[in-house]
């Protein structure tokens, strides 16, 4: 046991040393393994990570998250080397593959007056077809900022339908979904609420509408972190990927956290280990590379989103 602890601390030291030598930063999503949190220069949600990637002066960004997040970093910071600790094919978000660039073009033909909003959980090719991007923390704001009264929203139907509750525009959702959030079941969530009647239920907007209906608050992962950080100690039911429960337990050990419904894990988010981060820095792999024409067009949609907030 002692040896494992020593090994992890040695790994952390080596990573920190290489970060200094190579002027590198490690950006980490909230769903990553806790061992990765320890080497993070920034830990947050998709919006926070996009802003960090756009603002950094580092030469190398090691992105611990999923493929579309690392692509977003490259789109916003083309002059930096962006590295994934695991090959892109192992850290793919299945929802991002549920819509293609051709699918977006067909929707545009069908609804010529509609604007296209692409959730950041999309490929660079899909972002290149969009008018603007959004994340779970700014989707309502982004849709409200548009002049058009009709909005094609890709790929998450749950997030699109959630936004529809708050805007006076017609949302035309694509039929995509996140397999992790879409499986969080209403009956499991109700049971958790019965077991902990004094609790506060925080759910992610990628959940189904009937789960959102039960929530006290609907938040991005960073929104949940912020809510817990600024609340009195208490009991929280968490309706999102299991990694966030680890994150919140570390942040607020005096509070109690329970998974709302059956625990759900995002496989792609759990692929990267600390050893992979070290290898990424040593060997400068796996590098994210995008065709420049796609990158430039995708950057327009992402930069518009960042201007909105
Ligand atoms: P956040 O932007 O809320 O962190 O969500 C990212 C994600 O992939 C949710 O499944
Ligand atoms: Fe994609 Fe869902 Fe995993 Fe987020 S939790 S990266 S949306 S599969």
Image: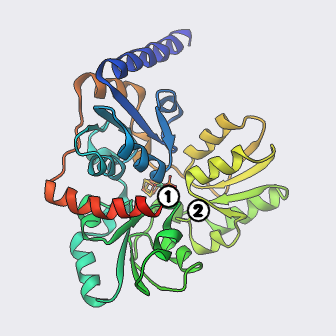
**Residue drawn at 85 percent across, 56 percent down:** 198
Residue 27 screen position, x and y as percent: 42, 38
**Residue drawn at 43 percent across, 69 percent down:** 156
Quarter the N terminus occupies = top right
Q: In this orientation, which residue lies closer to the viewer: 140 or 215?
A: 140
Q: Is residue 263 visible?
A: no
**Residue drawn at 56 percent across, 66 percent down:** 207
Residue 86, quarter of the rendered image: top left
Q: Left of 227 or right of it: where is 30?
A: left
Q: Secondary structure at mark 1?
A: helix
Alpha carbon distance from label 2 to label 1: 7 Å
Q: Residues within 10 Å of mark 2 (few under 14, many from 20)?
A: many
**Residue drawn at 46 percent across, 32 percent down:** 41
Q: Which residue is mark 1?
A: 180
User: For the residue with label 1, is its CB less than 8 Å from the closest atom of ligand 2?
Assistant: yes
Q: In this orientation, which residue lies closer to the viewer: 173 or 90?
A: 173
Query: Badges 2 and 1: C-beta atoms under 8 Å apart?
Result: yes
- Compared with 34, 260 (above or below) is below
Circle on res. 23: none
Residue 285 screen position, x and y as percent: 23, 32
Q: Left of 233 or right of it: where is 201?
A: left
Q: Which residue is mark 2?
A: 184
């Amino acid at each position: 046991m002692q040896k494992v602890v020593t090994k992890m601390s040695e790994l952390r030291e080596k990573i920190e040393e290489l970060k200094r030598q190579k002027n590198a930063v490690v950006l980490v999503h909230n769903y990553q393994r806790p061992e990765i949190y320890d080497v993070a220069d920034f830990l947050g949600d998709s919006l926070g990570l996009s802003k960090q990637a756009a603002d950094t002066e580092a030469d190398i960004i090691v992105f611990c998250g999923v493929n579309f997040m690392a692509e977003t970093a490259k789109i916003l910071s083309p002059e930096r080397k962006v590295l994934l600790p695991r090959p892109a094919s192992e850290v793919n978000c299945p929802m991002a593959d549920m819509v293609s660039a051709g699918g977006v073009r067909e929707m545009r033909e069908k609804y010529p007056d509609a604007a296209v909003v692409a959730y950041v959980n999309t490929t660079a090719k899909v972002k290149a077809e969009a008018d603007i991007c959004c994340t779970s923390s700014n989707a309502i704001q982004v849709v409200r900022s548009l002049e058009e009264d009709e909005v094609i929203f890709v790929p998450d139907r749950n997030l699109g339908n959630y936004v529809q509750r708050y805007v006076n525009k017609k949302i035309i959702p694509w039929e995509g979904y996140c397999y992790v959030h879409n499986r969080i079941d209403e009956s499991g969530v109700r049971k958790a609420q019965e077991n902990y009647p004094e609790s506060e239920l925080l759910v992610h907007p990628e959940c189904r509408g009937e789960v959102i209906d039960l929530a006290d608050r609907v938040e991005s992962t960073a929104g949940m972190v912020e809510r817990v950080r600024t609340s009195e100690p208490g009991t929280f039911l968490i309706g999102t990927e299991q990694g966030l429960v680890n994150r919140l337990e570390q942040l607020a050990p005096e509070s109690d956290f329970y998974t709302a419904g059956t625990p759900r894990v995002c496989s792609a988010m759990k692929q990267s280990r600390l050893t992979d981060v070290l290898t990424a820095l040593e060997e400068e792999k796996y590098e994210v590379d995008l065709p420049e024409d796609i990158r430039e067009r995708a950057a327009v949609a992402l930069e518009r989103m960042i201007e909105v907030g």
